[in-house]
Structures are given as C-alpha cells and as structure tokens.
Image (tube, grey):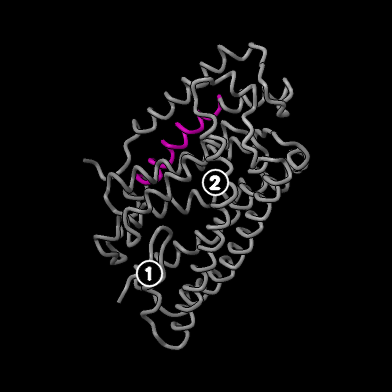
C-alpha cells in the first residue's frame, strides 16, 4: 500500500458533504416549526450559512490535493541525501514540510480573521448563532489538512513516538471541524482564530527537528530554540485565552441547555442532533481547557530540555518532541 494518502481518499468526505447539501437544498424552503423557542439565523444569514457549507466541498477537495502535491514536491525536490538525514526519518521530514505549510496558512488566516473581520467577530459576541464566510474558508483548509495527515499516518504507519493515539487526536479535530460547520453557534469563531495563531510555534518546532536531523549544531539550533520558546509562550497564552472565551460564550448563550435550532432540525431530521449538540458543547468547553494544560506541559518539557542544552548536554535537543510525539524514555 502506498505510504502517502492518495488523492481519491478526499472523494468520500466530499460525496458525503455533497449529499448533506443536496438534502438541505431540498428542504430549505420549508417553514421551520418546533416546540423550542431557540433564536435562529435570519433568512439572509441562513442563506449565507448554506452557501458557506456548499464551499466546504471544493475547499476540502482542492486543499487535499494541494497537501498531497506539497508532499510529492518535497520528495522530488529535496531527496535529503546531502544532509545525511536517516532513511527512517525522511518520510516524517517531508510530511513535516506539509505541516509547516499548513501552519503558515493557519497563521495568515487567523491573523486576517482577527484583524480584518472585526465586524463579524463583534456580531458573534452578541448573538447565539452566527455564520462567517472567513470561518468556513479557514476551517475548510484546516479540516482538509487534518484529514490528509490522518490518512498519511494510517497508510504510512508512522505514528511517531506518541503511538496510534495521534489518530484519535486528529479524528477529534476532524469531527470538530464538521460539527462547527454544521452547527454554527458563534462561540467557536474567536477562539478558533486564536488557535490558528498558535501554529506559529509549529513552524519553529519543525525547524528545530530539521536542524537536529541535519546534524547542525551550535548557534543555529540555539537561536531557533530561543524563538521556539518565545512562540510557545504565546501558544500557551493564546490557548488559555481561547479556553476562557469558549466557556464564557457557552455560558452567556445558554449552550449547556443543548438547544437544537429548529431550522437545522427541519433541514436534517435524520441526524442525531442531541448527540451533535452535546459533542459541540463538550468539544468547545472541555477540550480547549485540556489543550491549554497540554501546551503548558509541553512548554515545561521544552524549557527543561533547553536548560539542559545550555548547560552543556548537547543531546538534550534529541528529546524535543515534534507535534504528536512524546519524549522518548531513556
């Protein structure tokens, strides 16, 4: 079996999402009726939400092909023979190039949404449900990447030191993207953009691993380590900000009552909405807190290993985990 995710793997989710869109279109003209009194989108906002969901299919498919193309281009243009990178590390090297590319996309998208879409963010602060074109585009890119990386890990069987649990981590993110798109409660928007900005540390985390596997020592790895620690401090702070925003928004809008919006229920009557809404609330309340604590622990490991490196233990850098990996036991 191929050690990379083939392009046709992106067809199945696209077909499923397309089927949901078709069902929604066939029922979008029905007048919603429900015993619930939950506020819902205006007709104009519902039309925008519907158009945004329709865009998920081409964004997901095209970006999936893009990640695959970056992987192949890295393998063709960067054989790694001259750098002395171990054979067993080369697939991970090329896949981390894809991961770093996604991180740059995430930083650009998150920055744009935070500073250029302030009106959308302010509107999301005052309503229970809101939709945003920027969110759908940015999350569609992220959804596509995590699906790609999950397929890469499964097909290449390169789980890293973290083991198969990394697949669970990725599937949680894939489910989160889908639920956040189908259930447009506004609590996720600002916190999601904050999480995008945390990807800045991913670039330097991968660069740290690249430098080490290239057997480069001295100042390059020292200065990159300083930048990595600085960006990881920002990562920790941003994740705590995101967790705080998520939970205050959920409480302010009464999301712990698990409301099922009437119009969604009417459009997709066969979907298990009770489970979807509970999954949304759980993922946007508990998981951001868990991620903040996990990032704090990772920062502790990075700081500890950096101090050991500065004190003269030049092998300390070998223990710096890449994303999805744990520190190896001696």
The percent coordinates of residue 19 (x first, y second) are 46, 20
Which residue is located at x 50 percent, y 59 percent? 203
Above or below, 167 against 81 in this view is above
- Can you tell which of label 1 and label 2 is closer to the viewer? 2
The magenta stretch spans residue 61: yes
Prevalent SS, magenta region: helix
Q: How crowded is mark 1: few (under 14 residues within 10 Å), some or many (20 or more)?
A: some
Q: What element carries label 2?
A: helix
The percent coordinates of residue 98 (x first, y second) are 42, 49
Q: What stretch is highlighted in magenta?
A: 54-72
How many numbered dots are placed on residues in this image? 2
| Residue behind mark 1 | 327
User: Which residue ends up furthest to the left in the rendered image?
Assistant: 1
Task: Compare residues 65 and 160 and report the one nearer the observer.
Answer: 160
Residue 146's mark? none
Which residue is located at x 51 percent, y 41 percent? 176
Q: Real-space Cα distance between discs 1 and 2?
A: 26 Å
Task: Compare residues 164 and 10 and report the one nearer the observer.
Answer: 164
| Residue behind mark 2 | 283
Q: Quadrant of residue 218?
A: bottom left
Nearest to N terminus: mark 1 or mark 2: 2
């Amino acid at each position: 079996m191929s050690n990379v995710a083939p392009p046709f793997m992106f067809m199945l989710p696209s077909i499923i999402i397309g089927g949901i869109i078709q069902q929604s279109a066939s029922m979008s003209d029905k007048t919603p009726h429900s015993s619930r009194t939950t506020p819902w989108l205006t007709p104009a906002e519902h039309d925008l939400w519907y158009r945004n969901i329709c865009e998920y299919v081409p964004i997901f498919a095209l970006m999936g092909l893009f990640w695959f193309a970056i992987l192949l281009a890295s393998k063709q243009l960067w054989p790694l023979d001259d750098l002395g990178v171990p054979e067993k590390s080369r697939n991970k090297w090329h896949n981390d190039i894809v991961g770093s590319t996604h991180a740059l996309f995430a930083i650009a998208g998150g920055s744009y949404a935070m500073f250029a879409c302030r009106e959308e963010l302010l509107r999301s602060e005052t309503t229970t449900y809101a939709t945003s074109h920027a969110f759908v585009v940015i999350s569609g890119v992220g959804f596509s990447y995590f699906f790609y990386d999950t397929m890469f890990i499964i097909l290449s069987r390169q789980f890293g030191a973290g083991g198969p649990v990394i697949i669970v981590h990725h599937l949680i993110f894939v489910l989160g993207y889908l639920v956040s798109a189908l259930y447009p409660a506004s609590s996720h928007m600002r916190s999601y953009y904050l999480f995008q900005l945390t990807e800045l540390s991913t670039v330097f985390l991968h660069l740290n691993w690249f430098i080490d596997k290239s057997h480069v020592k001295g100042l390059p790895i020292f200065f990159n380590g300083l930048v990595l620690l600085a960006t990881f401090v920002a990562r920790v702070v941003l994740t705590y900000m995101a967790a705080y925003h998520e939970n205050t928004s959920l409480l302010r809008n009464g999301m712990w009552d698990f409301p099922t919006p009437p119009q969604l229920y009417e459009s997709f009557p066969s979907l298990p909405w009770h489970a979807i809404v509970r999954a949304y609330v759980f993922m946007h309340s508990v998981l951001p807190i868990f991620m903040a604590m996990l990032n704090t622990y990772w920062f502790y490991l990075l700081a500890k290993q950096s101090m050991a490196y500065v004190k003269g233990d030049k092998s300390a850098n070998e223990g710096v985990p890449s994303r999805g990996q744990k520190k190896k036991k001696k």
